[in-house]
Amino acid sequence: MSDPRSPATTDRAAELTDRLTAVRARIAAACDAAGRDPSGVGLLAVTKTIPAADVATLVDLGLDAFAENRAQEAASKVDEVREARPGTSPDWFFVGGLQRNKVRTVLPWVTRIDSVDSSRLARAIDKEVAKAVDAGERSGPLPVLVQFSVDGDPGRGGVAPDGLAELTDLVTELPGLELAGLMAVAPLGWEPDAAFARIAEAHRETVGRHPGATVLSAGMSGDLESAIGHGSTVVRVGTALVGDRRIASE
Ligand SMILES: *Cc1c(COP(=O)(O)O)cnc(C)c1O
């Protein structure tokens, strides 16, 4: 563990400060170009590649929404950040492929699972939520996003276009889940504008069926401007915000 006041830490804090300023400026410019109010676009910091100490620094800088994509790594990081910054309570989101037997691992700390892409996973979450409610560990349903796959590529997560309506209908029927909206990634090899136009259309259809599903999580470091232009309400930013520094143990 390095001394938190060491020059290296200070440099890192300065770097994160600059990166955050730059990301916020990009979001503001994209909102300006799209004629949108910046308060309508949330920033979700994807912290999967960085240590808890960096997340603590981001908390100091005012960020309060973090996303992880691996259940085990996330659980310990959430604990470490809680210990490093007692009295703060950032929201944590899960954005990765989730095995059904890992649902139990994420439930104690997760604010919303953003990567629900199958009826099997939806039912597994519903079951674990019911258990947690019975045990007095939580009081209500878990908000989720359904992950939508524009091209239906089974290798990259997300429900294919022809299965979207059925899955969102199921999620709204399960008592342990609350459909908050959709998450999507622009597929490799697609023009971002073409991908986000399709994603936005799928989101409009979803809101037509389920008016509460207002969240559209779309846009990352490389394409957030395009996503905001097409109506994204949450951008998920990793690399642009934190660099590509890896956790030492990986
Ligand atoms: C890693 C990740 C991001 C962030 O990607 P960057 O290009 O590093 O900004 C966003 N969404 C998901 C689902 C991710 O896994």
Image (cartoon, rainbow, N blue to C red):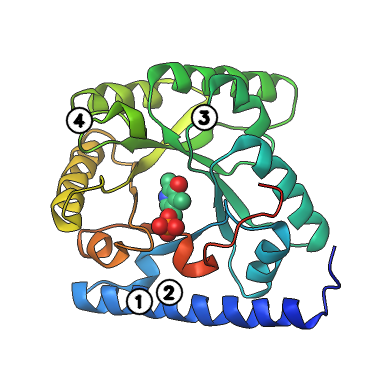
Q: Amino acid at mark 2?
A: Val
Q: Which mark is residue 23?
A: 2
Q: What is the CA distance from the residue labelled 2 to the residue labelled 4?
A: 31 Å
Q: In the visual, does 2 lie left or right of 97?
A: right
Q: Which mark is residue 26?
A: 1
Residue contact between numbered discs 2 and 4, judged by CB atoms under 8 Å: no
Quadrant of the frame with the N terminus: bottom right
The residue singled out by tag 3 in the image is 98
Residue contact between numbered discs 3 and 1, judged by CB atoms under 8 Å: no
Residue contact between numbered discs 2 and 1, judged by CB atoms under 8 Å: yes
For image coordinates 48% across by 29% down, the residue present is: 177
Please tell me whether residue 180 is drawn above or below residue 13 in the rendered image.
above
Q: Amino acid at mark 3?
A: Leu
Q: Amino acid at mark 4?
A: Pro
Please tell me whether residue 246 is drawn above or below residue 19 in the rendered image.
above
How far across and how far down the image is residue 27, in percent? Answer: 35, 73
The residue singled out by tag 4 in the image is 161
For image coordinates 35% across by 65% down, the residue present is: 40
Mark 2 residue crowding within 10 angstroms, few (<14) / some (14–19) / many (20+): some
Secondary structure beneath dot 1 equals helix
Q: Amino acid at mark 1?
A: Arg
Secondary structure beneath dot 2 equals helix
